[in-house]
Amino acid sequence: MSNSNPNETKLEQQRSDSAKAALKGQTEDNHTENTEAAADRIADNVEQAKKDK
């Protein structure tokens, strides 16, 4: 099932590239948020350990 209109193929490729970029951005944002949340938990644990001594 080939597409006879090359302009439609080009548009589909641009949409695909755009979707990939959006997903990559979301993934990187989620990674940053998770990393920061983990760092906060570690800092809280360190503070709690100091209080417990």
Image (cartoon, rainbow, N blue to C red):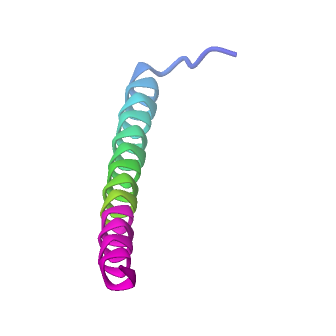
Comparing 42 with 22, the one in front is 42
> Which residue sits at x=36%, y=68%?
37
Q: Quadrant of the C terminus?
A: bottom left
Q: Where is residue 50 in the image (x, y as percent from the top left)?
A: 30, 77
Comparing 36 with 17, the one in front is 36
For the image shown, how many numbered marks are present on the structure?
Answer: 0
Q: Where is residue 11 in the image (x, y as percent from the top left)?
A: 39, 34
The residue stretch that appears in magenta: 37-53
> Which residue sits at x=33%, y=85%?
51
Which secondary structure dominates the residues rendered in magenta? helix
Considering only vertical position in the picture, is 36 above or below 14? below
Considering only vertical position in the picture, is 39 above or below 14? below
> Which residue sits at x=70%, y=16%?
1
Tell me, yes or no, whether the highlighted magenta stretch contains residue 23: no
The residue most toward the right is 1
Comparing 18 with 36, the one in front is 36
Considering only vertical position in the picture, is 1 above or below 11? above
The residue most toward the front is 53
The residue most toward the bottom is 51
> Which residue sits at x=48%, y=22%?
5
Q: In which quarter of the image is residue 44?
A: bottom left
Q: Where is residue 2 in the image (x, y as percent from the top left)?
A: 62, 14
Q: In which quarter of the image is residue 12?
A: top left
